[in-house]
Amino acid sequence: MSPTEFAEWVKAYDLHGVSEDDDIPQITFEKVKKANWLVASSLPRAIHSANLLKPTCPTEVNHLFREVEMPVPFIYLPLKLPINIWLIMARMFWLCGYARNVESYHEAKQRAKLAADQLCKYAKEHGRIVVVGHGWFNRLLGRELKQRQWNLERDQSFRHWQAVTYKK
């Protein structure tokens, strides 16, 4: 796809839900069942995912937990590349400081600190909580939780539909 097509693809991806044909691991359902509180990112795919998990606990949608946006560099280059190449290049540029009209890496790290504050508050108020979020932001949030002495339970997968657990 061209850079313009990539920019349109990114926009469309953020506006869509998830495939209901996805095979959700049983452990993910079990963790949601045990939760006292669920918070979902404000992006449609996270809200849709939370609905598919059918939580029995109170659920909150919170913009603080949204995925970091994808900058779209190279918009004027006459290139056609596979989507995976565009994704890798855009994320590498973002990690190096390029943010063209989206939240910068530094800003996303600051938001992760605020999100960690919110999660600590939720944990104190509700005990066991579940966050339905997104890969890149979850990585930033996980680093922030580790700095606050939260421990990642075992080495778990961060793939789609996988549930990871942090404990204090």
Image (cartoon, grey):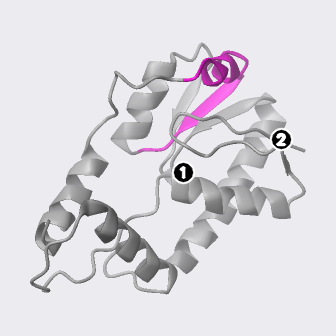
Do the numbered discs 1 and 2 sit on residues whose CB atoms are within 8 Å?
Answer: no
Q: Secondary structure at mark 2?
A: loop
Q: CA distance from mark 1 to mark 2?
A: 21 Å
User: In the rendering, which numbered label is found on residue 40?
Assistant: none
Residue of label 2: 153
> Is-magenta flag for residue 149?
no
Q: Residue at x 53, y 59 (%)?
A: 136
**Which class describes the residues within 10 Å of circle 2: few (<14), some (14-19), or many (20+)?**
few
The image quadrant that residue 70 belongs to is bottom left
On screen, residue 140 versus residue 125, left or right, reads left
- The region drawn magenta spans 25-42
Give residue 44's position: percent from left, percent from top: 34, 39
Compared with residue 158, is residue 115 higher up or lower down, i.e. above or below?
A: below
In the rendered image, the residue lying farthest to the left is: 78
Name the residue: 60% across, 53% down: 138
Residue at x 55% of width, y 43% of height: 159
Secondary structure of residue under mark 1? helix
Q: 101 above or below 155? A: below
Q: Quadrant of the C terminus?
A: top right
The answer to whether residue 79 is left or right of residue 156 is: left
Tell me the residue that label 1 is attached to. Answer: 65
Q: Report if residue 39 lies within the magenta region.
A: yes
